[in-house]
Image (spheres, helix red, strand yellow):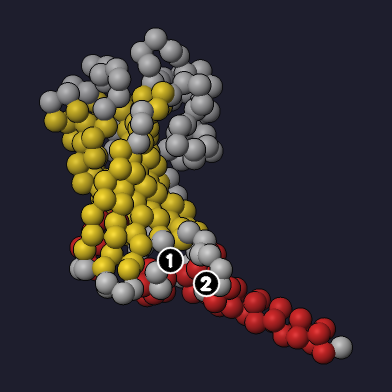
Amino acid sequence: MKIFKNFLFYCFIFVFCYLFFSGYSYASSPFMADISVTNSSSELLLSAKLKGGFTTEIEEIIHSGAPTTFTYYIKLMRYRSGWYDRTEYSKTIKRTVKYDVLKKEYKFSEEIEESALPPDKKNNSEKDLKGQGVEGSSESKTLNHGTLESSPPLINEKATKDFDELKKWLANLESIKITPTKPPASGSKYYVNIKADLKTIKLWFPFNYILFFVSLWDVTTDWEVSSPFSAD
C-alpha cells in the first residue's frame, strides 16, 4: 500500500510539473519576422529575425546548462504557373548554445548544410501548398529526397559572456547566402520559405530527472513566406 501511495504521489508531481512547465513555456509563441531578400551580384542574401524566442523560462533553461538548439529551415521556391512550385535550393542552419556554469560563458556553435537542385534533374514530386508557403511536410536536412544534393555541413564555433550578444547570434539571420547551383532564371518569380525549430537536448542522468521539464521544450514556428521577387 505504501508503494502504491508513493507511486500516486510521484505521478501527481509529474503531471503537475508537466502541465505547469509546458504551459508556461508555450505562453509565448515565437515567429519569424522582418524577412527580406536582396540581390548581390550573382547571390541572393536573406535576412530575418526570430521574435518571441526568449522568455524568462527559456533563459532559465539555457542557464541551467542544458544544450539548447535553434534550427532554421530555409527554402528558395520558384513560382510555376499551372504547376507545383519548385524548390530550387534549401539550407538548414543549426545554432546550439551550451552554458558553462563554472566559467559563466556561453559556448555557441553553428552548423550549416545546404542542398541545391542539379540543373539536369526535374522535381515533379512536390505538392502545391503555396498558400502556406511550403510544398511538403518533410523537415529533414535534405528536402525532397532524390532531387536535392547536399553539401558537407560547415561548422562555426565561438564563445561569449554577454547574453545579449548570444541572443543576437541565436535569433538573427543576417545576409544569409542563397546560392542555388542554377542561377535564378530571368523573369521568373521566386520567394523564400522559412521556419524555426527550438528545442533542448535531453540531459543525462541524474539531470534528466531533476530538470525533466527541460526535455519537454520543443517549439516550432509556422512557415513564413517572403515577398515575391524576380532575378531581374
Local crowd size for mark 2, using a 10 Å CA cut-off: few (<14), some (14–19), many (≥20): few
Q: Residue at x 30, y 20 (%)?
A: 181
Percent coordinates x, y for residue 149 in the rendering: 41, 23
Lateral position of residue 4 relative to residue 163, left or right = right
Q: Which amino acid type corresponds to the residue marked 1 in the rendered image? A: Ala
Q: In the rendered image, which quarter contains the C terminus? A: top left
Question: Viewer-nearest of labels 1 and 2?
Answer: 2
Displayed quadrant of residue 62: bottom left
Which residue, given by chain and number where applicable, does mark 1 sit on?
66
SS at circle 2: helix
Q: Are marks 1 and 2 in contact (CB under 8 Å)?
A: yes
From this viewpoint, is residue 20 visible?
yes
Q: Which residue is situated farthest in the top direction here?
A: 120
From this viewpoint, is residue 212 visible?
no
Q: Is residue 47 above or below residue 52?
A: above
SS at circle 1: loop
Q: Nearer the viewer, residue 126 or 132?
A: 126
Which residue, given by chain and number where applicable, does mark 2 sit on?
207
